[in-house]
Image: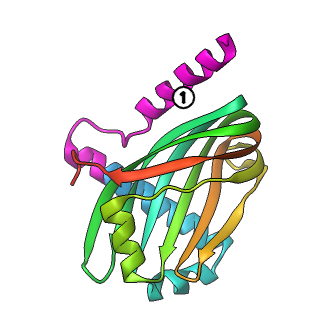
Amino acid sequence: MKKIFLSLIAGLLLFSCATPKGVTKQDQTDYALNMMNETLADLYKKKPETRAMIRKAAGYGVFSNIGSYLFFLSTGGGYGVVDDKSAGKKTYMKMAHVGAGLGMGVKDFRVVFIFKNKRVLKDFIEKGWEFGGQADAAAKSAEKGAAVGGEIYIDQDIVIYQLTEAGVALQATIGGTKYWKDEALN
């Protein structure tokens, strides 16, 4: 019971720290946009074909996530930016994750959503989104180490890429991830 309690505390601390850095709203939005641009540059290096996919897409979202995995519980949180290309509007969002499964470690990773369909993009922005299930292994610090991740095709309208920034984790979990608008930044 003590381990579960400590996991929950660690997850809540990670979630509370998972916001864009900065004192002002402008600082935070600039920080989130910088994270988005750096992540896209990294994705384009690793998967050059994604540049054309994003160019043709209705929009895309880039999220920075920190997750912790301790025995049977996983928690995490983060922030991101969704770019609705047809509307020419960026929406700043938050996310949180809770799951169950086998795992141990902490991981800092980025997720890129490519929305091929405007309806799916709008639903994601307006209603948030929940989904779950992942398995991976990561041992990475800065440019050293390796991580297994890749892309997920939800259906023909959404493609998701995960890029691990840093951390050590071995996990297989099923859980839910909720995304919602960041009222303070929009």
Find out whether residue 24 is within the magenta segment: yes
Residue 45 in which image quadrant: bottom right
Q: Determine the residue positioned at 52% across, 49% down.
A: 177
The image shows residue 116 at horizontal and vertical percentages of: 47, 83
Above or below, 110 against 25 in this view is below
Work out whether residue 129 can be spotted.
Answer: yes
Main SS of residues in magenta: helix
Residue at horizontal 23 percent and vertical 49 percent from the top? 185
Nearer the observer, 16 or 142: 16
Q: Does the image show residue 69?
A: no
User: Quadrant of residue 153 in the image?
Assistant: bottom right
Can you say which quadrant of the picture contains the C terminus? bottom left
Q: How many marks?
A: 1
Residue at the location (59% across, 16% down)?
Answer: 5
Residue 95: image location, x then y, percent: 44, 47
Image location (x, y in percent) of residue 90: 29, 66
Kindly identify which residue carries mark 1. Answer: 11
Badge 1 crowding class, 10 Å Cα cut-off, few under 14, some 14 to 19, many 20 or more, is: many
- Name the foreground residue: 92 vs 155: 155
Looking at the picture, tell me which residue is in the foreground, 22 or 60.
60
Q: Tell me the quarter of the image containing the N terminus.
A: top right
In the drawing, does residue 147 fall left or right of residue 186?
right
User: Given the current orientation, which residue lies at the most extreme top position?
Assistant: 2
Mark 1 residue element: helix
* Residue at 44% from the left image edge and 65% from the top image edge: 61
| Residue 27 falls within the magenta-colored stretch | yes
Q: Is residue 64 above or below residue 161?
A: above
Residue type at mark 1 is Gly
Q: Which residues are magenta?
A: 1-29
